[in-house]
Image (tube, rainbow, N blue to C red):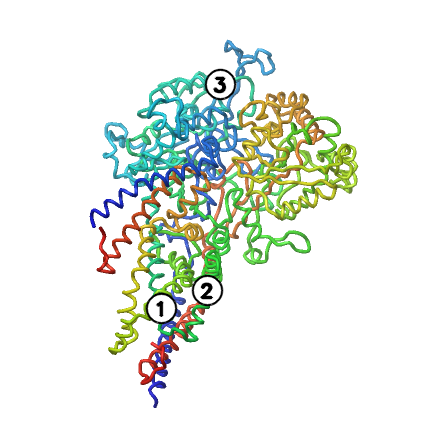
């Protein structure tokens, strides 16, 4: 047999042997038990019921309830801390309930001398809230509460070296706990006033809480070398009456203060925790209250690696709390009351992994490794394209999702996105009839419904008023439409015709979109944030405004530059948005309150349109101090009518969040205001495990194919090499 | 050599000052301290007092470069630039704008970066060199021409395509490995397979083509002909003669990269969820965290300078004729 053929046979035999080994290895791997190969979640051996979710696209920056003011941070803070008030999980419209306090605060009104007066008394100068802490409210186990034999804090160090072996909170072997006291709430409010902490609430709350400004100024003058015990410095508006009772005194009347008490800023902070985190050297190891929260809520943080994951576990000291037995109509049919009366939380652990890109997030969700597609607004925008398709009947869920029996939890947040007019702009601003008609023509031309369908797959609701659904003052049906832009036809709002818009434009002095005096075409300038607009959107807007002969020029810029333009009034049309702090019309109507204009207040005011209407402002001032009732409703309607008549915003919509849940996740109702809903979430772990295995059987043929390709590439080379080595004559130029 | 290294280290000081000055200027051209304060404080209820308080608390309440309010040297030293830069040279990176200790974060995050970068780097070089040597062995044949075509094709494909394609096929369709993530305590290798594979495959085109050029130049040298005339096998010629003689240009390209491996990869880390320094930098840019950006650029500059010095030193090892003086 020729030598070359023997080599070839040897190589084929080697290849066959290698393939055999690979097949055997592959079969063994595929056949062995255990989790799927692509399972990214660690296997815990403690049998705790674990909820797997995601934080995206950036990790939280602050977890200190005094400094955090972002919804992605609330996702964690609201599970760990319990402010005095909270929201009912199921009821809509949103309903306040006492959380860490035993009952609703008792409210009395006082005059300048501190005498009690009636609510409508002109002498009213202050409102005093008295709050009683729940008797069974206890902090999570934490080393800050650990005591030595003498009853002194176990972990107080004089030098950085003494505590240097503790890198993370779980490194501390001893922990302790104690009941929540009234003074802890007072201490927390004092922290808001501490300039060294830099709470975003300081400026706003100083207008209300008595003595906050003076307290803050006093702290600002103190030397800052060590921990400052705020208990040593009284604040006029705060008082501790006994172990479980405290009062907050605010200036004037401000019914919305109850909503503020439902925000994490007012969660209790134990002074010894603050003291603990001021140990020397702790800050250098990121052992701070900003990274290791300590609360009395249903969960506690056991791992904080903001680079990859945050892990919460059930707080063993959480009070006895039960799943609600009442909801809104439809909740029972949706199975949301099946767990009524059961003790919560249902899960033992929650893992939130950092995902920065949509493809991995979405893939892991579909593979069953994430229980939900996301937790906070913004995250879901990235999955719209993956989750929905446009079918003959409109926007539908993709077949991939239907095959996985995935459920959808839509949620219209108490939020609004809008493009506003600058009412001081010389071309489109002002309050004369022609300017109103000009703005109304532009409003009609901008087909918000089409915009939402094209760019957001219908996940938004065109706005007729600044007040979103679910908030008092929002009206359904014909009574709720903006009659300047819509007609009520066949039981639904219908946008007025483009011919009518053209007529308005002509009456405004721009027939056919040209200035009647100069003949110049009307061009509007839209300032947008670069990342918030695409070429497709701009082309679409060019088209809709082109229908009435108006030209558009876009001025995209980053957020800082856009903000600068708003602060200086150097804009004509701008984009903005607002996510409410609490579900009250006042929190939306203040977006158009005259004194909130940045040009007038010389601050980052909320009235970026620089809208100024005496009627509106007068109504708003009354709305702010009135308790809910018919009188207040009338004033809200009056303010909304002014807004519509003056055509202050080009268009607005209420964003819908779409949350997707795998079939083994229960109690998926979303709460637009509160993030403290993790304790209601239920998981069927058995179903999850079965589905994960069924959906993630590895496809092994590419491994064999890859091996064959490598062999196929190497074999000819080896053959040629051997031939060449054994050849007796060469052509010139070869190696 | 010692004197040479000291001299090069001293040269590094003005370079680092220049890099720091440039970073500082570029950052503050687009961001003012007020912008930074607003970015950190959020968009609601931001008052001028809150902005002033944030700037004071974080040391941004001074002029950027020149303090007209101070006299003498104080006009230069009582500035944001001086206060923030001086500490860098003492390797005190301070705290990020969100309050975390940067030194701690960097020392924690460099290990995941290395876990991906080191095998990608080592396997990549081995594969590229082997492939290039094989192609050189068959130079001027159809195999060589096809190989060059494949190399150019691989080079022409976007890096993002390799990442997304790799994730889509290997992790999503075939379900062989996790699509992203990293857990040092839980089978870290299975999270590294895909990013390393993507890094190696995406680098074969440019790497092997470059090495092929170097090796081809050496293959035409007299000493190769002599070795062959003496009866040395092709394998021996390639690995014992051509490869060592082509080391100088290879070292120029790769030694400089070794210290930078600590810095990680922006794209790989972001797409594969690796909590390394590459994603740290990217997050800092996104959130306008100047303290981190400045520190990372500074560390990157130092590592690059270190890489250049190591490259020079490696020449003396690769070629005994080279003397550093």
Residue A576 x, y percent position in the rendering? 59, 36
Q: Is residue A209 visible?
A: yes
The residue positioned 33% from the left and 55% from the top of the image is B118
Tell me residue A338's x, y (percent): 54, 45
Q: Secondary structure at mark 2?
A: helix
First reached walking from the N terminus: tag 1 or tag 2? 2
- Chain label for disc 3: A
Question: What's the distance in space between the residues labelled 2 and 3, CA to CA?
Answer: 74 Å
Nearer the observer, A220 or A332 = A220
Q: Judge if badges 1 and 3 mark residues of a common chain.
A: no
As drawn, the label of residue B196 is none
- Residue B92 against residue A271 in the figure, above or below: below
* Residue pointed to by mark 3: A249
Instruction: Kindly report which numbered mark, 1 or 2, lies closer to the viewer in this rendering.
Output: 1
Q: Chain of mark 1?
A: B
Residue occupying the point 30% across, 43% down: B12
A82 relative to B143, above or below = above
Q: Residue furthest toward the top?
A: A113
Q: Are marks 1 and 2 on the same chain?
A: yes
As helix, strand or loop, the secondary structure at mark 1 comes to helix
Question: On residue B152, which mark appears?
Answer: 2
Q: Spot the residue most to the left.
A: B2
Location of mark 1 (residue): B216
x%, y% of residue A263? Answer: 49, 31
């Amino acid at each position: 047999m020729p030598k070359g053929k023997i080599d070839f046979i040897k190589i084929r035999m080697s290849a066959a042997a290698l393939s055999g080994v690979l097949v055997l290895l592959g079969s063994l791997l595929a056949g062995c038990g255990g989790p799927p190969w692509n399972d990214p979640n660690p296997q815990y051996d403690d049998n705790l019921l674990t909820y797997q979710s995601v934080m995206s696209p950036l990790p939280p920056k602050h977890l200190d309830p005094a400094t955090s003011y972002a919804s992605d941070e609330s996702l964690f803070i609201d599970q760990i801390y319990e402010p005095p008030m909270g929201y009912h999980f199921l009821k809509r419209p949103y309903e306040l309930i006492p959380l860490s306090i035993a009952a609703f605060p008792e409210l009395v009104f006082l005059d300048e001398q501190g005498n009690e007066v009636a609510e409508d008394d002109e002498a009213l100068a202050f409102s005093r809230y008295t709050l009683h802490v729940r008797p069974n409210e206890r902090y999570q186990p934490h080393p800050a509460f650990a005591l030595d034999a003498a009853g002194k804090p176990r972990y107080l160090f004089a030098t950085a070296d003494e505590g240097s072996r503790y890198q993370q909170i779980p490194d501390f072997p001893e922990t302790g706990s104690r009941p929540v006291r009234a003074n802890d709430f007072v201490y927390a409010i004092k922290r808001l006033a501490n300039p060294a902490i830099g709470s975003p609430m300081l400026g706003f709350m100083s207008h209300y809480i008595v003595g906050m400004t003076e307290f803050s100024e006093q702290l600002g003058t103190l030397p800052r070398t060590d921990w400052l015990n705020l208990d040593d410095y009284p604040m006029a508006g705060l008082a501790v009456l006994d172990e479980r009772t405290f009062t907050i005194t605010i200036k004037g009347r401000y019914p919305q203060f109850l909503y503020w008490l439902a925000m994490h800023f007012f969660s209790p902070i134990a002074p010894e925790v603050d003291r603990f985190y001021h140990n020397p050297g702790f800050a250098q190891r990121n052992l701070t209250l900003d990274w290791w929260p300590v609360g009395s809520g249903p969960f506690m943080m056991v791992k904080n690696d903001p680079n990859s994951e945050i892990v919460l576990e059930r707080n063993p000291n959480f009070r006895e709390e039960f799943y609600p037995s009442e909801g809104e109509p439809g909740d029972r049919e949706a199975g949301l009351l099946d767990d009524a009366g059961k003790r919560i939380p249902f899960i033992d652990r929650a893992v939130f992994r950092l995902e920065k890109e949509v493809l991995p997030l979405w893939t892991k969700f579909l593979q069953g490794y994430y229980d939900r597609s996301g937790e906070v607004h913004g995250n879901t925008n990235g999955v719209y394209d993956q989750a929905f398709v446009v079918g003959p009947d409109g926007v539908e869920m993709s077949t991939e999702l239907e095959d996985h029996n995935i459920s959808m939890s839509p949620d219209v947040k108490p939020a609004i996105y809008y493009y506003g007019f600058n009412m001081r702009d010389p071309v489109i601003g002002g309050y004369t009839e022609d300017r109103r008609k000009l703005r109304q023509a532009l409003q009609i031309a901008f087909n918000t419904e089409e915009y939402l369908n094209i760019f957001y797959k219908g996940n938004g609701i065109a706005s007729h008023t600044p007040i979103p659904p679910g908030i008092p003052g929002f009206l359904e049906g014909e009574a709720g439409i903006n009659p300047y832009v819509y007609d009520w036809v066949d039981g639904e709002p219908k946008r007025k015709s483009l011919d009518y818009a053209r007529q308005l434009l002509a009456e405004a002095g721009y027939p056919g979109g040209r200035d009647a005096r100069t003949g110049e075409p009307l061009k509007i300038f839209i300032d947008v944030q670069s990342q918030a607009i695409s070429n497709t959107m701009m082309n679409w807007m060019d088209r809709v405004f082109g229908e009435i002969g108006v030209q558009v020029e876009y001025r995209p810029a980053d957020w800082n530059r856009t903000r600068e333009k708003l602060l200086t009034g150097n804009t004509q049309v701008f984009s903005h948005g607002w996510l409410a702090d609490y579900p009250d019309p006042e929190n939306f109507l203040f977006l158009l309150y005259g004194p909130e204009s940045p040009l007038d207040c010389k601050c980052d005011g909320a009235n970026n349109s620089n809208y100024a209407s005496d009627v509106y402002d007068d109504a708003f001032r009354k709305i702010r101090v009135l308790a809910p009732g018919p009188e207040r409703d009338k004033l809200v309607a009056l303010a909304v009518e002014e807004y519509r008549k003056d055509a202050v915003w080009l268009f607005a919509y209420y964003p819908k969040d779409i949350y997707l849940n795998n079939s083994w996740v229960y109690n998926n109702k979303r709460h637009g205001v509160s993030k403290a809903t993790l304790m209601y979430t239920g998981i069927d772990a058995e179903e999850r495990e079965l589905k994960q295995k069924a959906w993630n059987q590895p496809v092994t043929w590419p491994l064999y194919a890859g091996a064959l390709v490598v062999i196929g590439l190497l074999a000819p080379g080896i053959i040629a090499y051997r031939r060449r080595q054994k050849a007796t004559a060469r052509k010139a130029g070869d190696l | 050599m010692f004197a040479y290294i000291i001299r090069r280290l001293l040269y590094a000081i003005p370079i680092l000052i220049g890099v720091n000055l440039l970073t500082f200027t570029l950052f503050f051209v687009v961001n003012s301290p007020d912008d930074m304060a607003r970015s950190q404080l959020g968009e609601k209820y931001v008052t001028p007092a809150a902005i002033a308080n944030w700037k004071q608390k974080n040391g941004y309440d001074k002029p950027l470069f020149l303090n007209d309010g101070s006299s003498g040297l104080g006009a230069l030293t009582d500035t944001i630039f001086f206060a923030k830069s001086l500490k860098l040279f003492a390797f005190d990176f301070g705290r990020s704008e969100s309050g975390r200790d940067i030194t701690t974060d960097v020392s924690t995050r460099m290990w995941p970066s290395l876990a991906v970068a080191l095998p990608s780097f080592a396997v990549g070089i081995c594969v590229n060199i082997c492939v290039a040597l094989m192609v050189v062995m068959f130079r001027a044949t159809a195999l060589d021409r096809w190989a060059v075509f494949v190399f150019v094709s691989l080079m022409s494909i976007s890096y993002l395509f390799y990442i997304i394609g790799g994730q889509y096929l290997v992790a999503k369709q075939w379900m062989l490995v996790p699509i992203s993530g990293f857990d040092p305590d839980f089978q870290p290798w299975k999270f590294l397979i895909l990013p390393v594979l993507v890094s190696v495959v995406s680098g074969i085109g440019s790497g092997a083509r470059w090495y092929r050029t170097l090796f081809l130049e050496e293959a035409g040298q007299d000493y190769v002909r002599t070795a062959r005339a003496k009866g040395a096998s092709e394998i021996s010629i390639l690995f014992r003669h051509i490869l060592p003689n082509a080391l100088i240009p290879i070292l120029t390209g790769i030694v400089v990269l070794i210290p930078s491996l600590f810095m990680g990869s922006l794209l790989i880390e972001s797409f594969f969820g690796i909590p390394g320094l590459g994603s740290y930098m990217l997050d800092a840019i996104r959130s306008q965290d100047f303290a981190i950006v400045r520190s990372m650029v500074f560390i990157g500059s130092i590592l690059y300078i270190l890489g250049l010095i190591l490259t020079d030193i490696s020449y003396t090892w690769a070629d005994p004729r080279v003397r550093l003086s």
